[in-house]
Image (cartoon, rainbow, N blue to C red):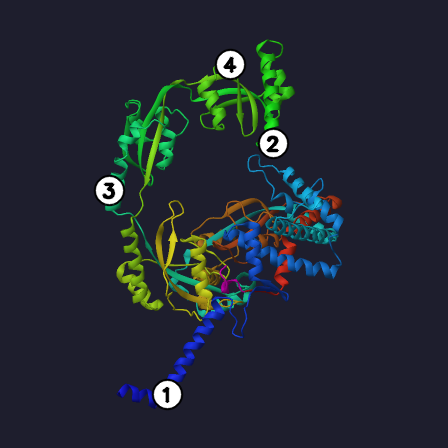
Amino acid sequence: MAMIQKIRANSWLLVVLIALGLLGFLVMDMTSGQQSVFGGVDTEMGNVNGTAIDANEFNNRLNNVFRSADYTQREQLWNFYVEDIILKDEAADLGLGVGKTELIDREFGVNPDPAVTKWFINPQTGQVDRQQINQVQQSIESGTFTDPQGRYFWAHVEKEVIKSRLQSKMNNLVSKAMFTPTWMAQLMNEELNQKLDLAYVRIPYSEVDNSEVEVKDSDIAAFLKENPGRFERPEEVRVISFVTFDVEPTAEDSSRIRTELEALAADFSAAEDDSLFTEINDGQFPIQYLHQEDLPENLADVAFGLQVGETNGPYVEGRYYRMAKLVDRKPVPDSVRSRHILRRIEDPTNTQAFEDARRLIDSLKNLIETGVATFDTLAKQFGQDGTAAIGGDLDFALQGSMVPAFNQYIFHEGKIGQLGVVETQFGVHLVEVTDRRNVQEGVRMAFVNRPIIPGEETRRAASNMALEFAADNRDAESMKKSAAEKGYEILQTTPRVSADYTITGLGSGPDAREIIRWAFLGDTEPGDVSADIYAFEDDQFLYENKYVVASLENIQKPGLPSVAEVRPEVENEVRNMKKAEVLSSRIQGSSLESIAGQFATEVDTSRGVAFSAGFVPGIGREPQVISAAFSLEVNQVSAPVAGQSGVFVLNVYYKQPVPAINMPQVRRQMSSRMRSQVAGNLVNSLRSDAEVEDNRARFNY
């Protein structure tokens, strides 16, 4: 009753609490999905120079074109959207476009655009499948291209072709406008061709103890101000700390798995179809006959003592318990030399092509066997691969290095000098074995496996530990203290942007992506700990192999980082700068010998120093030393130079004369080099000037 009276007396507080609760739900909806506070649905995933990128359209294209949720492809598609908008805006200002005739030629002409050919690679040959491109063209021209998904796909391909052509035209406009003036060519000639020899004294920074210099915040702030381009961030980044709870198989898990495999021993030994049995039991049935030295160490000592049909194991190999069965034994070579005449088949489904190839190969076989023609002559005339010019010779091949059917013939069926016909995915071969090496007894083994992975109880225990840890530690300080007490390691990400999907130590993919999304969503503040735990999957065996509790370490705004954020990265460098001031003040005398004597070091020399090389022979990468050396006259002693590894004092004792310039040649070289960089840099330059708003963190991206 007293509680009710309190609530009535403070009804304003109840109203405020309810309002805050409702506001929280609204904010959560606004920041974690597509719901707009003004009603309707907000689907703007991004915006480029005022042009919106719609999340639904993006996902439709991802599903219908790429047909994959792979994050690399998502990033590729995002970059396509951004660059397509930028290029179209720029093309409109320049009056550039792609006409219908040009578009059709770049889609179906003699040399299709790479934006087309990349989608039509035959996986068996690695070559462009021109037949598929022709089929698309015929379907479009005949009006039979009615498949909705196919039409959607081709519409995207056309967009890629248009983008490619616009980009190519802009690249050409810029590259053709490049010119190398005389002064630049002369400077380049000096940088490339002039070399010098110098003597130097190096005083390492270790001559000054760290306790002698103090790196103040003002020192780091001044360093940031002097080097803004090196540290400035174009967008906000966030750093995440996390604790992982790994799921490892226990001794009980291992024992259970071993017992399961042992129970298969009798059936494995009695199996008549080893290929089927191994397939059912996650095993392998290799075609190779292996010599003793080719077998794993734990099997080599026992395999040759088994009887055909007898099994060995279980034994541990990698992440598996394995059981092996001796299937057969016979003398086999470790390598075979052969030659062939290949009649290539581009389309493995073309039965008529196979029939024609078989007839021709049979005719060639008959000509060789009756002595009418030689293998060499016919290979050069009828072979359709790179070996034709050398009589079809394939040299020596190891077991398993050829495709299965070819390997089976030359190692186990064909005899030296005997002709055989073999069909593979490449076509029809006329094959002759010409030599064999190291023939000795080999064994063919079959294997059944069981992965050594954690059981359900083990996974549940790890999950519960992570849940308990997250529930007990609701802020970062508590999380760090608890982790230290329990012996857990806290790891930290490098700065992540909102669209990242990779965390070092955790990998890439949807799980890492969800942690990064959480860090950027809603009202997440530094010090917050994720309410959820994140489950990561083993790439090989597809079980949850770790659980992660994350906290937001800090938020780094666009622009220059704060002194605290950058101190770990630059503190040592700034300290060395201050040490250089101390060392410079201690240097006495004007000769290298006196300076070397003062610091108990030696005068060294470096010959053939080139300005364009970027490093000094005998010293390493020292750009400040190179710059100072080339500004000296011969026999002039430099002021102290603060380098990467210490303070240097230099004396140039020889400068090679600059050779006479071949102005046209140098201009061509410089212009060619600059033009070659346009394709890789122009779009990036336009992108850096564009207004790109990236809202992907708000969506299930």
Q: Which residue is mark 1?
A: 11
Q: Nearer the viewer, mark 1 or mark 3?
A: 1
Task: State which tag comes first along the sequence, 2 or 3.
Answer: 3
Task: Specify the amino acid type for callout 3.
Answer: Ser
Q: Nearer the viewer, residue 531 or 100?
A: 100
Task: Specify the amino acid type for callout 2.
Answer: Glu
Relative to 75, residue 662 above or below: above
Q: Which residue is mark 2?
A: 346
Crowd rating for badge 3 (residues with CA inside 10 Å; few <14, some 14–19, many 20+): few
Label of residue 418 in the image: 4
Tags 3 and 4 in contact by the CB under 8 Å rule? no
Q: CA distance from mark 2 to mark 3?
A: 51 Å
Horizontal and vertical percent for residue 378?
A: 62, 17
Would residue 592 be seen by someone viewing this image from the given angle? no
Residue 353 lies left or right of residue 472; in this view the side is right
Q: Secondary structure at mark 3?
A: helix
Q: Secondary structure at mark 1?
A: helix
Q: Which residue is mark 3?
A: 255
Horizontal and vertical percent for residue 223?
A: 51, 65
Task: Specify the amino acid type for callout 4.
Answer: Gln
Numbered range of the magenta stretch = 695-701
Q: Nearer the viewer, residue 150 or 96?
A: 150
**Image point 42% across, 59% down: which residue?**
493
Q: Nearer the viewer, mark 4 or mark 1?
A: 1
